[in-house]
Image (cartoon, rainbow, N blue to C red):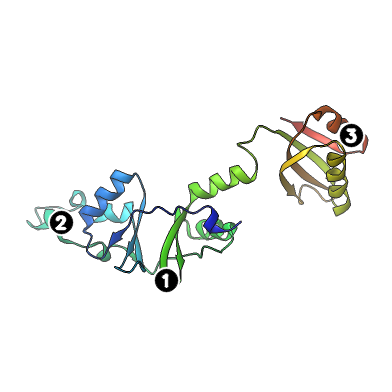
């Protein structure tokens, strides 16, 4: 699964001339937490977060120290607070690469860049939505949790049984480290005779942990 299939393409962006105050309005009006900063040709210059904007707003500045401090957000540009040269991914990068980067760097979103041009942004919400669709969580299907032998043959035997029972497989998840001799196979399947499929699995020696 590639980033380009799940990234947000319709972006709200700031430019070099955008002020901190204007950026704050964009973030608030569009209910977003990060604002890519681009030049006039669409090249990514940096990224500004909601937290960055908060640092530049007068609420944390004591006007008593400087009478002109309250005008700072009106005049200061986003380039003074943005993170320059942020971490990016390519549209053709695997989705799991983005997830690893977010986790490792404790960030909630990554700009997607193609030859220097900003083409999208991938966020935690996008990855969560992808996970739901890939795992068939939005589909009207049955979830089977099976304990099978820790070998490839056991997996293929389950798939063969489901095929013989005319079951449609919507999603597959395999946890190989369930135990030394067993692995946990989670399936989301659909079909006319679910009970027949479950009975067939029991008959071949598969432990059905749960059916939901």
Q: Examine the rendered structure and indicate whether residue 162 appears above or below residue 73.
A: above
Mark 1 neighbour class, 10 Å CA radius: few under 14, some 14 to 19, many 20 or more: some
Q: CA distance from mark 1 to mark 2?
A: 29 Å
Measure how far apart labels 3 and 1 are at the Cα level.
Answer: 55 Å
**Where residue 70 appears, x then y in whole percent?**
12, 53
Quick one: SS at disc 2?
helix
Residue 4 horizontal side relative to residue 17, left or right: right
- Residue plotted at (36% across, 50% down): 33
- The residue tagged 1 is 116
Contact (Cβ within 8 Å) of mark 3 with mark 1: no
Figure quadrant of the N terminus: bottom right
Residue closer to the observer: 32 or 107 = 32
Residue picked out by circle 3: 200
Q: Nearer the viewer, residue 3 or 80?
A: 3
The residue that disc 2 covers is 74
In this rendering, the count of numbered labels is 3
Q: x, y percentage for residue 110?
A: 45, 59
Could you say which disc has been placed on residue 61 in the image? none
Q: As displayed, is residue 159 above or below residue 44?
A: above
Frontmost residue, 94 versus 119? 119
């Amino acid at each position: 699964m590639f980033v380009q299939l799940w990234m947000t393409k319709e972006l709200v962006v700031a430019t070099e001339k955008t002020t901190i105050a204007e950026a704050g309005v964009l973030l608030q009006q569009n209910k977003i937490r990060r604002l890519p900063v681009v030049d006039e040709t669409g090249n990514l210059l940096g990224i500004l977060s909601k937290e960055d904007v908060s640092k530049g707003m007068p609420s944390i500045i004591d006007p008593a120290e400087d009478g002109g401090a309250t005008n700072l957000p009106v005049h200061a540009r986003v380039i003074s607070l943005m993170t320059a040269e942020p971490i990016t991914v390519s549209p053709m990068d695997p989705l799991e690469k983005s997830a690893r980067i977010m986790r490792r760097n404790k960030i909630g979103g990554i700009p997607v860049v193609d030859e220097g041009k900003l083409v999208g942004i991938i966020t935690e919400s996008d990855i969560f939505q992808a996970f739901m669709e890939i795992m068939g969580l939005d589909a009207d299907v049955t979830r089977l949790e099976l304990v099978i032998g820790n070998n490839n043959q056991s997996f293929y035997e389950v798939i063969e049984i489901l095929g013989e029972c005319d079951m449609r497989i919507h999603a597959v998840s395999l946890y190989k480290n369930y135990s030394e001799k067993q692995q946990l196979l989670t399936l989301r399947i659909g079909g006319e005779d679910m009970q027949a499929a479950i009975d067939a699995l029991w008959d071949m020696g598969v432990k059905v942990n749960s059916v939901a």
